[in-house]
Image (cartoon, coloured by chain):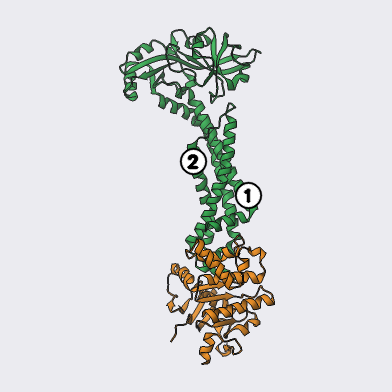
Chain colours: A green, B orange
């Protein structure tokens, strides 16, 4: 029976190509859109996810990372004094204006790292060192954004908020959802580069004592430190992702595009499988007259759909992985990992099998007596 | 007394209901013993294909009795009918109805696949069935590469491979040239004679008469007993011999 399903598919090459084109289109579109979704999602929250903190302390009511409001850095000591806190440090994340060497302006996401601690530091470092941020005017930028920042690499200089900035290190592949290039600097320089008073911070990062429950420690900090919000890093990351992906509608747009891709796939596959079924309707009638049960015929149709799904998915996901790989060289990443690829395979299979329902309905209603009609 | 392969008694068939009802068969009674070639002739729309479909457990009679090898099928649930067809009946169609994507052997083996027989045993039986219709050398040819007569012989091999006791053929020579038609008719007659199968043929082809043991005429849904005839010129089949003795 597998042979029948396979042979039916291979017999009509044109129809097979149309079917596979539909599935490949659906798989490529869906996987790229979902990969973009994941890429965007990661970009929104990478700074939080890679900070290495268990708790974030922020001004009350701040909804997302880039719009933090400064508060007194003295709260750092209140946090440190709370039982269960192993370490805490100041941190700044805010938008700033980068003036290129040629005079052009570019918005950047400035990240001020307290170099006395270990949290919030740049990651994916490919040149220079975090320690170099102690040097005057030192900044670390990402390779992906060099041209956007109007510089070529280490040693180049620019201005942030009217203060000199000199590149001392490079990361590779740290993206931001807002497309504002990330610029790491020391906490002190970050205060200098923008309107953050010398006795203020925008965030406090904290680690809990190993073995302590972060939620319980967060509750203690909330009691001990007033006029701030204390959030678990995971919750803060989720809130950040929700804000950018769904609060702004950006994520919904990407998901709708992915859903449309799947819908187009379903329609194309349903149409081609149905057309193939109608073309072979006499043969199906013959099988039915010979004594084949409906279940037997369903299996033939479903196997055709499944074989189409596997072939179409194989081609489509290969194209999507190629696109994903190519995207890593740019500022917009399509992140296609095994769990997503696996989920897409299941989705493609379900899509193709679902598209067979119309054909199955046709065969169910098929009167075997039709084989006697000329 | 030997159980006939097919026995229909007072069978009638009505399509639709109320004032739009159309009766296709009126109280038809007929028995076909094993080993007989029965020809059903009649004008288009006379009901012969309807009767063939009822005999083949493809169409349900509106009333009467239909026995296939002694099994009453009229009141059997719909789900039982495919199994009855599988066990007892092989079909040969006017348009051959071969799968174009499958080779001759694979088309024949498909009839076994439906029965759950797969792999090497199915292949061997398919080749053997093709050999029985003289097409062993065409086992790997595709329908598109076969002549009409060869396609019909493949269809006959497919009908036979499941070893049914009854073969129902609907206009088996209509799409064939004269020589191919003779080959197919001869094959069906040998099937009845040598393998003791009941063969029922619906046809307009008068050449078929010389291959039949018996001919019945149907007109307006009625079996015309008056013109039912035993073809004494037909080559002897076991059934014909039994009747003659």
How many marks on residues? 2
Indicate the secondary structure of the residue bearing disc 1: helix
Badge 2 vs badge 1, beta-carbon distance below 8 Å: no
Viewer-closest of B105 and A100: B105
**Residue A214 at x, y percent in the picture:** 34, 23
Residue shown at the point (32%, 24%) measured from the top left:
A213
Q: Position of residue B212 (x, y in %)?
A: 59, 84
Q: Which residue is mark 2?
A: A342
The percent position of residue A130, horizontal first and vertical second, equals: 49, 14
Report if residue B27 is visible in the image: yes
On whether disc 2 and disc 1 are found on a single subunit, the reply is yes
Q: Is residue B16 visible?
A: no
Q: Nearer the viewer, residue B99 or B125?
A: B125
Q: Which chain's residue wears label 1?
A: A
Disc 2 and disc 1: Cα gap in Å? 24 Å
Tell me the residue at 59%/52% (across/down): A271
Give residue A5's position: percent from left, percent from top.
55, 56
Q: Is residue A54 above or below residue B143?
A: above
Q: Is residue A169 above or below residue B150?
A: above
Residue A168 marker: none
- Residue lying farthest to the bottom in this orientation: B245
Q: Taking B83 as reference, is A269 above or below it?
A: above
Badge 1: few (under 14), some or many (20 or more) residues near its Cα, within 10 Å? some
Q: Quadrant of residue A235?
A: top left
> Mark 1 highlights which residue?
A18
In screen coordinates, is B41 left or right of A134?
right
Instruction: Report crowding for label 2: few under 14, some 14 to 19, many 20 or more residues within 10 A (C-alpha).
Output: few
Q: Earlier in the sequence, mark 2 or mark 1?
A: 1
Nearest the camera: B70 or A79? B70
Q: Quadrant of the rendered structure where residue A145 is?
A: top right
- If the image is split into quadrants, where does the C terminus of chain A sit? bottom right
């Amino acid at each position: 029976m597998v042979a029948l399903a396979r042979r039916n598919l291979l017999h009509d090459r044109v129809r097979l190509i149309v079917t596979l084109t539909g599935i490949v289109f659906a798989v490529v579109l869906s996987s790229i859109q979902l990969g973009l979704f994941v890429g965007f999602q990661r970009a929104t929250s990478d700074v939080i996810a890679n900070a290495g903190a268990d708790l974030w302390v922020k001004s009350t009511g701040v909804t997302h990372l880039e719009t933090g409001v400064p508060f007194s850095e003295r709260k750092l000591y209140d946090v440190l004094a709370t039982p269960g806190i192993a370490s805490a440090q100041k941190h700044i994340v805010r938008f700033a204006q980068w003036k290129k060497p040629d005079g052009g302006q570019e918005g950047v996401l400035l990240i001020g790292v307290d170099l006395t601690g270990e949290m919030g530091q740049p990651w994916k470092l490919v040149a220079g060192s975090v320690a170099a941020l102690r040097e005057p005017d030192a900044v670390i930028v990402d390779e992906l954004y060099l041209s956007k920042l109007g510089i070529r690499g280490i040693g180049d200089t620019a201005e942030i908020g009217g203060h000199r900035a000199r590149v001392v290190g490079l990361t590779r592949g740290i993206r931001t959802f807002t497309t504002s290039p990330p610029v790491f600097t020391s906490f002190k320089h970050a205060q200098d580069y923008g309107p953050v008073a010398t006795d203020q911070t925008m965030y406090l990062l904290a680690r809990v004592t190993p073995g302590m429950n972060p939620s319980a420690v967060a509750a203690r900090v909330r009691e001990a430190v007033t006029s701030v919000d204390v959030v678990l890093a995971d919750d803060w990351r989720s809130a950040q992702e929700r804000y950018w992906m769904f609060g702004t509608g950006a994520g919904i747009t990407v998901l709708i595009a992915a859903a449309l891709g799947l819908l187009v796939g379903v329609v194309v596959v349903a149409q081609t499988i149905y057309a193939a079924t109608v073309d072979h309707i006499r043969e199906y009638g013959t099988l039915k007259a010979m004594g084949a049960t409906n279940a037997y015929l369903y299996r033939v149709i479903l196997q055709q759909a499944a074989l189409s799904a596997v072939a179409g998915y194989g081609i489509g996901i290969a194209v999507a992985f190629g696109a994903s790989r190519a995207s890593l060289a740019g500022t917009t990443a399509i992140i296609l990992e095994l769990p997503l690829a696996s989920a897409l395979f299941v989705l493609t299979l379900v899509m193709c099998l679902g598209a067979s329902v119309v054909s199955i309905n046709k065969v169910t209603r098929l009167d075997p007596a039709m084989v006697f009609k000329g | 007394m030997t159980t006939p392969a097919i026995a229909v008694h007072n069978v009638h068939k009505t399509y639709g209901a109320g004032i739009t009802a159309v009766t296709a068969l009126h109280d038809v009674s007929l028995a076909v013993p094993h080993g007989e070639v029965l020809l059903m002739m009649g004008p288009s729309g006379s009901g012969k294909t309807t009767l063939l479909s009822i005999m083949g457990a493809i169409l349900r009679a509106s009333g009467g009795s239909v026995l296939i090898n002694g099994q009453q099928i009229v009141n059997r649930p719909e789900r039982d009918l495919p199994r009855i067809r599988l066990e007892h009946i092989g079909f040969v169609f006017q348009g051959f109805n071969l799968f174009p994507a499958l080779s001759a052997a694979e088309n024949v083996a498909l009839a076994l696949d439906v029965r759950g027989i797969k792999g090497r045993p199915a292949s061997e039986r398919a080749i053997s069935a093709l050999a029985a219709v003289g097409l062993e050398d065409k086992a790997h040819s595709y329908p598109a590469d076969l002549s009409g007569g060869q396609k019909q012989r493949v269809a006959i091999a497919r009908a036979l491979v499941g070893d049914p006791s009854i073969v129902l053929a609907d206009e088996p020579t209509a799409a064939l040239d004269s020589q191919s038609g003779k080959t197919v008719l001869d094959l069906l007659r040998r099937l009845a004679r040598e393998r003791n199968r009941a063969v029922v043929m619906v046809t307009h082809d008068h050449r078929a008469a010389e291959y039949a043991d018996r001919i019945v005429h149907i007109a307006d849904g009625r079996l015309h007993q008056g013109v039912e005839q035993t073809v004494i010129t037909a080559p002897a089949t076991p059934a014909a011999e039994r009747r003659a003795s």
